[in-house]
Image (cartoon, grey):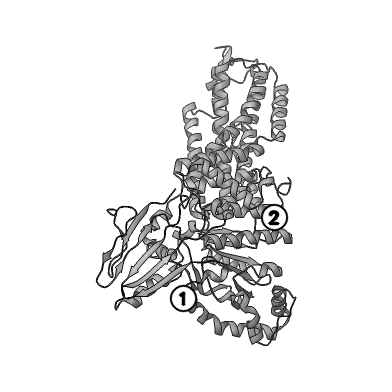
Amino acid sequence: MACALDYLTIGVEEDFKRDPAMPSGTIYTVQGESITVTIPFITDSPRTLQLSFQDVTILHQERKILNEVSGTVSPGEVLAIMGPSGSGKTTLLDCLSGQRHIDSGAIFLNREPLSKKWRRKICYVLQEEIFFSGLTLRETVWYTALLRLPEKMPKSQKITLVDGILEALDLTFCQHTKFGDYMNRGLSGGEKKRANIACELLTNPLLMLLDEPTSGLDSHSAISLMKVLKRYALQELKTVVITVHQPSSQMFHMFDKLLLLYNGDMAYFGEVNSIYRYFEDIGVVIEPHYNPAEFVLEQLKSHPDVREKLFIAARESHGNFLNRNCIACSNHKKNGFNNNKMIQNDSAGLAIEKSGRQHDALINDIINNYYKDQQQHVDHHVVMNQSPCEEATEQLWCGGDSQSNFSSLSSDSHSCDWLDYPTRFCAQFCVLSNRNFKEAKSRMLSKLNWFQTVGLALMAGAIWFNIPRTEEYLHDLQGWMFFSQTYWMLFALFGALNSFPSEREVINKERRSGSYRLSAYYLAKMFGELPLVVTLPTVYLTISYPMLGCSSLKLFSLMLIFLLLNTIVAQSVGFFIGACCMDMNVSITLSALYTLATQLFGGYLTTRIPEYLNWIRYTSMIHYAYQNMQILEFREGRPIECSYPSSYEVCKNNATAFISYKEILKAQNSTSPLWVNTLVLMMFFLVFRGLGYAVLRYIRCPKT
């Protein structure tokens, strides 16, 4: 499909503006005060991004982790940040991605200061592979596509895009394998790293930051991965920055530029091919047939005199290099990229013709078919009349790539669009609900949990089997109610508590990339896991309660509703504690303290609570849930017969042969009605869910 043409009007003191009145395929000329510009503009033209950073410094306890580090990398180039462990490579990437504040210096994207609006045009591939262990590789990439690709993009194109990226990264054969964890085997380290990159390639980022993408890979896999990144950078004019510890000689020569760090200081920045002369200038010759990367690192670590010379040379040369590269036009021919620009001067003016680029099918067809709308590149014809403003005009059109200039000049008008989420709230909610359900299903409905639930249900049913409904066995019947409520409170609370550590890093990573709203995730987690939360308590009650002698479907349904309500409230408390505490030991300690206090003040273990502690029982969810079960059981179920001698006045006075539910609750100092208990439990649910969201939103918000 050909891309629709629009037209731009440029005057000396005018901003870019479209002229929709011009018919497609014609050339429109606008006369300014001293300049004439004719541009058929492609509205869906892809953008490029130039990254520059100047004198970046990071301080930590008066120690400089990074000391005035500078560099620049243009579209189509691969910059390698190399140095020994602890030299500040990852710290620099954190700064370039905007995840870490710099103490001094500046970072520019297309000559604009780094800001939040760029975050969806930057991808940061972390060294750690952070994924849900219960999902397969294809499921992970597919959910990423649904969340981060435009919602209007047809599903068939998304499937084609996912299939193509998996094939390009050689992941097709393992796409149905789960990621796994330390207990369950899954994908290998190299496959996880490529999966990490696959998720980021989906969004067609302008800038790719990769932290040690080849670490842990064998030499063949590392070279193959670098070939993909190199080809992607060249063909799609993407800016790629990677950190690398000690690359092979073949990989080293794939880089366009090299930034050499040692203990936070810059030892070299420039073209990779220039490093030979650079070392010769300080009196060190890189030996033939020697891996230059190994030689450079050896000189840095083992020869202090050479290291000092490198620091001095770097400080003297990097300023001029940056200034030259920020002003001059980017020359991609040295990387195999041919702009095929023709500049002609005549008496009528200056004509600039830029032909379409030829793309290799590997990455172009996979990544950019949707973004470019499968368009044929249209020649840009620009006619400019020379004038006294010629110098300013040349600076306007010659700063890097033309696409980069269009991006830079029009970025303000598009900034609001860039801050929008790629999908609507309802779409995010549906996708995240589906993912949460699938990820939690194997964890919450594991064979062990099924065995535990059925086993306890049978055991409880056997202990309280057909219990007589007399005053003598009243305490035993209350024991079943208290046990059931307590067990499912503990099960739901600690289950929610254990789910957060495994999810926290994944959610933070996705929030930093702007994949979805936190509210969508939070509601999706609540509703997506709801069928799983209610399944096991339902099975438990279905087995154990009829064994007690219950034969009323109405009573069973009511008991189930209030058992599930207590379970969901307990899960809310677990979410809140899990969100508050980063340390799992602290979470377990606080949860144990709360649940034990809840049981002590629940009304079953003791009714003799000191007056100064009596208020605590009103904070116990078991107190309200236990009361509700008693009200239902003794009001809706078969009545409790009096025993002789009896502890109830109505039985002592021979007023009745049965004990009412009000008398039973009164003996426990519990007189609140069913609706009040239910309302309090619902308030528990809303308060703890709201507090959990507030903690994630304002306290545990990842740095972006």
Q: Is residue 668 left or right of residue 40?
A: right
Q: Is residue 156 above or below residue 303?
A: above
Q: In this view, does 323 lie to the left or right of 667?
A: left
Q: Is residue 364 above or below residue 50?
A: above
Q: Can residue 620 be seen?
A: no
Q: Earlier in the sequence, mark 2 or mark 1?
A: 2
Alpha-carbon span between mark 2 and mark 1? 39 Å
Judge depth for marks 2 and 1 and give the one in front. 1
In the picture of the structure, the residue carrying the numbered disc 2 is 190
Q: In this view, does 361 lie above or below 250?
A: above
Q: Which residue is drawn at 57% across and 54% down?
A: 361
Q: Residue 181 carries which label?
A: none
130 or 252, which lies in front? 252
Q: Can residue 82 be seen?
A: yes
Q: Residues within 10 Å of mark 2 (few under 14, many from 20)?
A: some
Q: In this view, does 232 lie to the left or right of 11?
A: right
Q: Quadrant of residue 438?
A: top right
313 or 40, which lies in front? 40
Q: Residue at x 63, y 78 (%)?
A: 275
Q: In this view, does 194 lie above or below 443?
A: below
* Callout 2 amino acid: Gly
In the picture of the structure, the residue carrying the numbered disc 1 is 328
Residue 589's spot in the image, x, y percent?
64, 48
Residue 183's spot in the image, x, y percent?
74, 46
Residue 394's spot in the image, x, y percent?
38, 74
* Callout 1 amino acid: Ala
376 or 145, which lies in front? 376
